Image: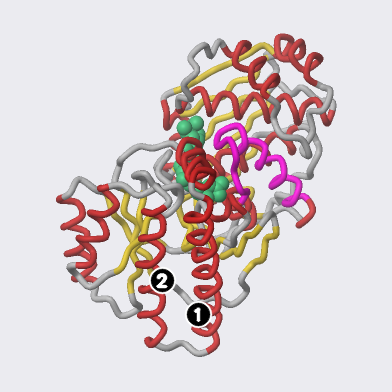
Amino acid sequence: MLAKPLTLSAPGKAILHGEHAVVHGKAALAVALNLRTFLQIRPSNNGKVLICLPNIGTSLNWETVQLRTLLRAFSDGLDESKSPSPEQMDALKEFAGITTGLSTTESLATLAFLYLYLSISAKYGQIPSVEIVVWSELPIGAGLGSSAAYSVCLAAALLTACGAIGCPLEEEKSVVRWPEEELDLINRWAFRGEQVIHGKPSGVDNSVATWGGVLRFQSGKITSLKRVPTLRILLTNTKVSRSTKILVAGVKDKILKFPAIMNPVLASIDAISQECENVLEAMAESPSQEYYPVLEELFDINQHHLNVVGVGHSSLDNVCRVTATHGLHSKLTGAGGGGCAITLLRPDTDPLMVEAVRQDLSACGFECWETSIGVPGICLHSLSSLKAEVLHVFNSA
Ligand SMILES: Nc1ncnc2c1ncn2[C@@H]1O[C@H](COP(=O)(O)OP(=O)(O)OP(=O)(O)O)[C@@H](O)[C@H]1O
Ligand SMILES: C[C@@](O)(CCO)CC(=O)[O-]
Ligand SMILES: [Mg+2]
C-alpha cells in the first residue's frame, strides 16, 4: 500500500484549565504547542516491522509472520470502537517479552505501538512491512502530551500504510492535513493508543494533537475556539518524572474516598474552565489589559485545587513561588506530580524580565522557554519542509 516514505508530525499540548477534572466529565481548555513529535514511515520488503525511538534509545523489530500469528488470535473485536482488553494487553506483553508488572517508558511505547499496529492491521486486512522512526521535540512524560502526539502520529501513519485513509500530500505543497472525517478516524484510533499508555484517558490530549488550535473538550465533545487572543506562555519543566497513569488513578481513589469533598472541587475546576473560556472570548472581541488579572487569578485558584486533588509537587510549588516574586502567575499543566508548569505573560511583559525569571527558574534546576500556542494538528510534510534537526534524526536512524 505504502509506495514511498511519509513524514508526519503532531503537536504537544498545554492544558490551561481542566486537567484531571476532564477525566470525570468536566470541561477542559487545551492549546496545541509549537513542540512536535515527528514520525517517518518507510515501506520495506524484508518482511519485518521495525520501530526506532531515538528519544528513549529503543529500536525493536519483529517478523510480520510472527505478528500474523498474534493477529489471528486477536482479530475478533480489534477495532477503533473497543477499548484494549486486559487479555489483549497480557498477550501483547507476553509477545513482547515484557515480564515486569511496572510500566516503563519503553514497555508503554512498545505496547501502544503493537496494539495500534495489530488492531489497525486486523481491521483493514493489511500487515505491512514497514520501518518507523518516531522522534519528539517534546519532553517525554512531562505533562505536554507526548503520549498523545506519539499515538496520533502512529495512528495516522498506520492507517495510511493500511490504505484506510488517503495520502493527501501533493508535490507542490510542503504541509497538508487530512480531510475532517479522516482526522476523526485518526483521533479515535489514537485514543486507543492513549488508553494503553494512560489507563483511563479523557481524550483531550489526542484531540488537541489531532485537531490543533485551541479546544474546549468535555465528555468526548470537541469544540474549536474560533476567536482567541494571542496568549504568551512560559513553560517550565521541573524535570521531576511522573506517570500520568498513576496520577489519574490516584485522583480517582481520592474521589472514591472523599466524594463529598472532592466532587465540589471538580465542579469548581469546571467553572474555572467556563470562566476562562468566557474571558478569552471577550478578549478576542475587544482586547484589553483589564482581563489579565482575571486570567491570573484563575491560574492561582486552579493551582490550589490541583494541590487539593493530590497532583501537586514541591517542584511545582517552587515554580509558582519563583514566578510570583516577579509578579507572575503559574499553575501545573497536564497530569502534575512534577512535569511542567505554565506561567501567563502579559503582552507587554518586558523581555528582560522574562530573562530574569528564566534565570531564577534555571537556578532551581528547571528548564524554561516561551512558546507559541494554537498551532495546527497532525499533518504530512514534504521532506524539503523539514527542519535540518528532524532530517538529521531520520537520516541517522
Ligand atoms: N517520542 C517518544 N518515543 C517513545 N515513547 C514515547 C514518545 N513520546 C511518548 N512516549 C510514550 O509516552 C509515555 C509518556 O506518557 P505520559 O502520558 O506519562 O506523559 P505525557 O504524555 O508526556 O504527559 P501528559 O499525559 O501529562 O500530558 C512514555 O513513557 C512513552 O512510553
Ligand atoms: C491528567 C489528564 O487530565 C490530562 C493529561 O494531559 C488526563 C486526561 O485527561 O486523560
Ligand atoms: Mg500523556
- Does residue 384 appear in the picture of this structure? no
Magenta portion: prevailing SS class: helix
Mark 2 vs mark 1: in front: 2
Residue wearing tag 1: 279
**Secondary element at image label 2:** helix
- Does residue 72 appear in the picture of this structure? yes
User: Which image quarter holds the N terminus?
Assistant: top right
Residue drawn at x 70%, y 9% is 66
Q: Amino acid at mark 1?
A: Val
Residue drawn at x 82%, y 30% is 123
Horizontal side of 149 relative to 114 (left or right) equals left
Residue 105 rendering spot, x and y as whole percentages = 45, 28
Image-quadrant location for residue 174: bottom right
What is the CA distance from the residue labelled 2 to the residue labelled 1? Answer: 11 Å
Residue wearing tag 2: 298
Q: Which residues are magenta?
A: 182-203
> Relative to residue 231, is residue 250 depicted above or below?
above
> Relative to residue 185, is residue 127 depicted above or below?
above
- In the image, 284 versus 11, the foreground residue is 284
Q: Amino acid at mark 2?
A: Leu
- In the image, 367 versus 394, the foreground residue is 367
Horizontal side of 79 relative to 353 (left or right) equals right
Assess whether mark 1 and mark 2 are in contact (beta carbons under 8 angstroms).
yes
Earlier along the polypeptide chain: callout 2 or callout 1? Answer: 1
Residue 301 rendering spot, x and y as whole percentages = 38, 67
- In the image, 115 versus 369, the foreground residue is 115
